[in-house]
Amino acid sequence: MSDNPVQEAIDTEIKSNDVVLFMKGTPVFPQCGFSAAVVQVLNHLGVKYKGVNVLEDDSLRNGIKDYSNWPTIPQLYVKGDFIGGCDIVREMFETGELTEAFSTRGVDVQIEA
């Protein structure tokens, strides 16, 4: 374990939720286009996920970048694995890889008709 409470809090979120999106804003009210795009993909796939608003806490906003060693937000985690940011999620969605990533990790996908 780390001596860093922010890293521990991030780790707890990722380990206690199957799908976590660290984002700017909330799933109901995304506050940047990139976060909104990922929310749209997840909603389209009907995946249950937890949105964590990094705008509420600067230490969280910077901490998640350190945690993943990834410079941008949003960041999507599935069953503890870092999937990627907006461009990666969008690309994986378009190729079908995202649905496969959820399925292979045992996350239910309910695609909207």
Image (spheres, rainbow, N blue to C red):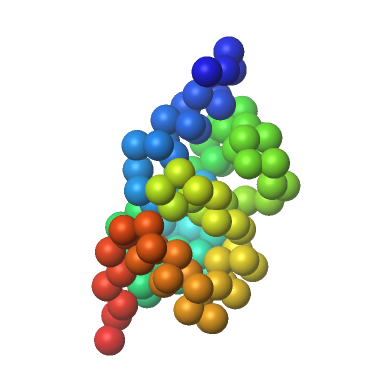
The answer to which quarter of the image holds residue 27 is bottom left
Residue 90 location (% of width, % of height): 56, 72
Task: Give whichever of 51, 20 is nearer the camera.
Answer: 20
Is residue 48 found left or right of 54 in the rendered image? left
Is residue 108 found left or right of 88 in the rendered image? left
Q: Does residue 54 lie above or below 112 as drawn? A: above
- Check the image and name the residue furthest to the front: 104
Residue 61 location (% of width, % of height): 61, 37
The number of numbered badges drawn on the structure is 0
Residue 80 location (% of width, % of height): 45, 44
Quarter of the C terminus within the rendering: bottom left
Write the residue at 38% across / 63% down: 104
The answer to which quarter of the image holds residue 105 is bottom left
Write the residue at 58% across / 13% down: 3
Q: Does residue 44 lie above or below 56 as drawn? A: below
Write the residue at 51% across / 64% down: 38
> Does residue 40 show up?
no
- Check the image and name the residue furthest to the top: 3
Task: Give whichever of 15, 46 is nearer the camera.
Answer: 15
> Does residue 99 show up?
yes
Write the residue at 37% across / 74% down: 44
Is residue 61 found left or right of 37 in the rendered image? right
- Check the image and name the residue furthest to the bottom: 113
